[in-house]
Image: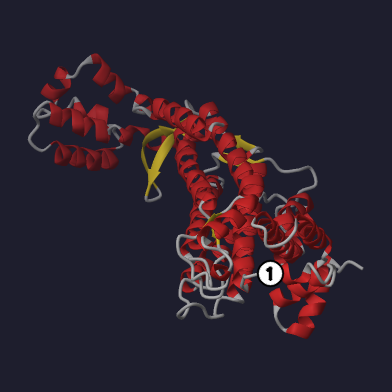
Amino acid sequence: MERDIFLNLSPLDHRYYASNEPLFNQLAEYFSENAYIRYELKVEAALVRVLAKRGLCSQAIAAEVSQACNEVEPEEVYLEEEKTKHNIRALVNCIQHRVSEAARPYVHFTTTSVDIMDSATALRFKEATEKVVLPKMLELEALLIAIARREKGTLQVGRTHGQHAVPITFGFAMAEYVSRLGSRIECVKQTADNLRGKISGAVGAYNASSLFFDDPMEFETEVLWELGLQPAIYSNQIVEPEYLTDYIHAILSAFGVLANLADDIRNLQRTEIGEVGEVFEATQVGSSTMPHKRNPWNFEHVKSMWKEFMPRMVTLYADQISEHQRDLTNSASGRFVPEIVVGFVAAVDRLTRVMKKLVVDESRMKRNFEMTKEMVIAEPLYILLASLGHPDAHEAVRKLTLKSQQTGKTLRELLVTQEELFPYWERLTPKQRGVLEHPEQYRGWAERKTEYLCDLWEKRLMI
């Protein structure tokens, strides 16, 4: 009988499962307890296959054990663990109960518990990344590229410190996230590909396997090759923790990019800014008491999820520490690591869905730019004056901006009335004057850099 999901304790397993059942079912194939045990069984099966190839047991025994590994159910492993008080011994017992007496000695032969656990962990994280994490990230990246290209010429005022700066385009603003997410995709792939396993025994020195093999390191490599893994360069009873630490750092670093994007889009939806918006469904409610509200809750949700999972990186760093060949201080904390990846993928999926419905208000962007467009020319004006030899151009323009604010006249109007500055005005080229007369043209290479970044990341990620 299945447990009611609303009796589960983690919000991932009720609130977010209920809201995105297909995604969470997909992730469960890698990150559920059921999946973990099945991956451990894959390692046990790979072990006995290599024992058969090495001539320690027959191919028939290898097939028998492999079949048993396919049949063991996680629930029976847990029932067995109630007796053994040891998870891997319980797993081994469940396999041995299903095989002949001739096959039983070769189950878990020469290995220790963490050979199985760490190799299973590496394999499931690696496969989850290949099958789910990276495809989801690439889908979002492709969407951001499409938005950046579409909006590459859409005028938007640039902002620094929450203040209007010089103009850019909305596509250029989105190109920031094209580039940042692109680099994180590469990092996630690289660190996932580098996740390692071990078949080196109780303290990592191949004590048991060396009794049977002249080349125990090659034996380890062969077992892990069956699983598509490489061995850790060094292992004691555990795999060097830095492989997993680096992978989770890559995930959380990417999560930070999502949170920053979500925060930017959320702020652009403020009433006083109103440059973008999320299309609301016909039945969607923004507030329980204010029917007119359209809160940017999906973007707030992404940032909130990041706030929950980002601090868990500290635990990964703490789990780098293990006394001598191994202690159990990471045995509980390590079981929560999959939640980080699940939370991240759920956020990627949500952000993709909501960005597909993003509406850009070009007229509002233009109106916001118009608010300060006459001050925008302060930067090009100061630089042009300096290029023409003005000894203190920045100070001259700063004073001019103060006078503009006091009189209500534009910088251009004041410029031609200043006896000291008028000679410089006469020396400007038509193109330079054009920028001062039409501040919206002062966009630099925003459009070209947007195209460059989109082309770059499409090529590097083969989108």
Check the image and report above or below for 48 versus 389. Answer: below
Viewer can see residue 337: yes
- Quarter occupied by residue 37: bottom right
The residue closer to the viewer here, 435 or 305, is 305
Q: Position of residue 366 (x, y in %)?
A: 48, 31
**Colouring of the image:** secondary structure
Q: Residue at x 84, y 61 (%)?
A: 71
Check the image and report above or below for 48 versus 335. Answer: above
Q: Residue at x 61, y 76 (%)?
A: 332
The residue closer to the viewer here, 230 or 460, is 230
**In the shown orientation, is residue 403 left or right of residue 448?**
left
Q: Position of residue 33 (x, y in %)?
A: 73, 66
Which amino acid is tagged 1? His
Mark 1: give few (<14), some (14-19) or many (20+) Cα within 10 Å. Answer: many
**In the shown orientation, is residue 72 left or right of residue 287?**
right
Q: Residue at x 77, y 71 (%)?
A: 104
Q: Position of residue 169 (x, y in %)?
A: 44, 32
- Quarter occupied by residue 119: bottom right
Q: Secondary structure at mark 1?
A: loop
- Quarter occupied by residue 97: bottom right
Kindly identify which residue carries mark 1: 108
Quadrant in which the C terminus appears: top right
Residue furthest top as drawn:
430
Residue furthest right as drawn:
1
The residue closer to the viewer here, 424 or 240, is 240
**In the shown orientation, is residue 173 left or right of residue 7?**
left
Viewer can see residue 7: no
Quadrant in which the N terminus appears: bottom right
